[in-house]
Amino acid sequence: MRKQIAAANWKMNCTFQQGEKLLDDILSAEIELASHQLAIFAVPYPYLLMTRSEVEEEQNYYVAAQNCHDKKFGAYTGEVSAAMLHSMNVNYCVIGHSERREYNGETNAMLADKVNLCFENFITPLFCCGEPLNIREAGTQNDYVAVQLKESLFHLPADKIKNIVIAYEPIWAIGTGKTASTEQAQEIHQYLRSVIAGQYGEAVANEIPILYGGSVKANNAKELFSCADVDGGLVGGASLVAADFIEIIKALK
């Protein structure tokens, strides 16, 4: 079975003390994950070591960075390299989140470089893709997300890409008052998998977890995760509430 993943993205939230308590509260639920299930915490840079320390004794619980730079090293004040993350035993890194694409001008080419650097440093990229409202309303979302995959990932050989995690973000359904249905989630996830299969074959495509990143909550996680091609969620706001994220972890297939 493909890996099923509950990934928390704290974004720029929580003080150190609040983050520590949040992790303690979640871990105190003592959820025993199956061998194919993972819980990943993408936390702000200052909390990486604390989070790693909290989860390192737990089975299938991991820490992720929310970003890395697209250069190996150099005079980039305020930036963090993939090599730095590797030196801290960080296992995962979120790449290409919609907020970084929008606010930081990250291009598909830059993200391809980041993906490469992650793999060079033994870090699994959690690669984000998804379309904004105007693209969804125009009905061109399939072409849009296909280009994101092709320009950022399809330079990879099959033995590399099969180890990636993809997260689909319906940007149009986040903070707009619009809601993506379970059917819409399954439809786009199935399409993403078909695009990968067209390049690498079905065997590779069927190994890659594709997470849903559109306002996953405690009360809709089980229904979303029951979809054949939805392999968990990249969770924002609900990951900041211990009781909610506990239920989301429990909802994994």
Image (cartoon, rainbow, N blue to C red):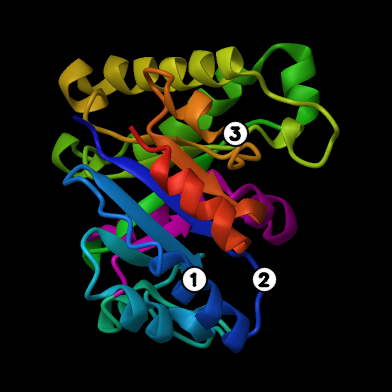
Residue at 65 percent of width and 18 percent of height: 181
Q: Main secondary structure of the magenta part?
A: helix
Whether residue 39 is situated above or below residue 42 in the rendered picture: above
Q: Nearer the viewer, residue 172 or 245?
A: 245
Q: Specify whether 65 is left or right of 206.
A: right
- Crowding near pointer 1: few (<14 within 10 Å), some, many (20+)? some
**Residue 210: x, y in percent?**
39, 33
What's under tag 1, amino acid-wise?
Asp
Q: Specify whether 187 is left or right of 152.
A: right
Say which residue label 3 marks.
Answer: 130
What's under tag 2, amino acid-wise?
Met
Which image quadrant for residue 91? bottom left
Which of disc 1 and disc 2 is earlier in sequence?
2
Query: Which numbered dot is residue 95?
Result: none
Which image quadrant for residue 21? bottom right
Whether residue 220 is situated above or below residue 239 in the rendered picture: above
What's under tag 3, amino acid-wise?
Gly
Say which residue label 1 marks.
Answer: 25
Say which residue label 2 marks.
Answer: 12
Q: Are marks 2 and 3 in contact (CB under 8 Å)?
A: no
Foreground mark, 2 or 1, reads: 1
Q: Secondary structure at mark 1?
A: helix
**Residue 201: x, y in percent?**
20, 18
**Residue 174: x, y in percent?**
74, 39
Q: Nearer the viewer, residue 75 or 251?
A: 251
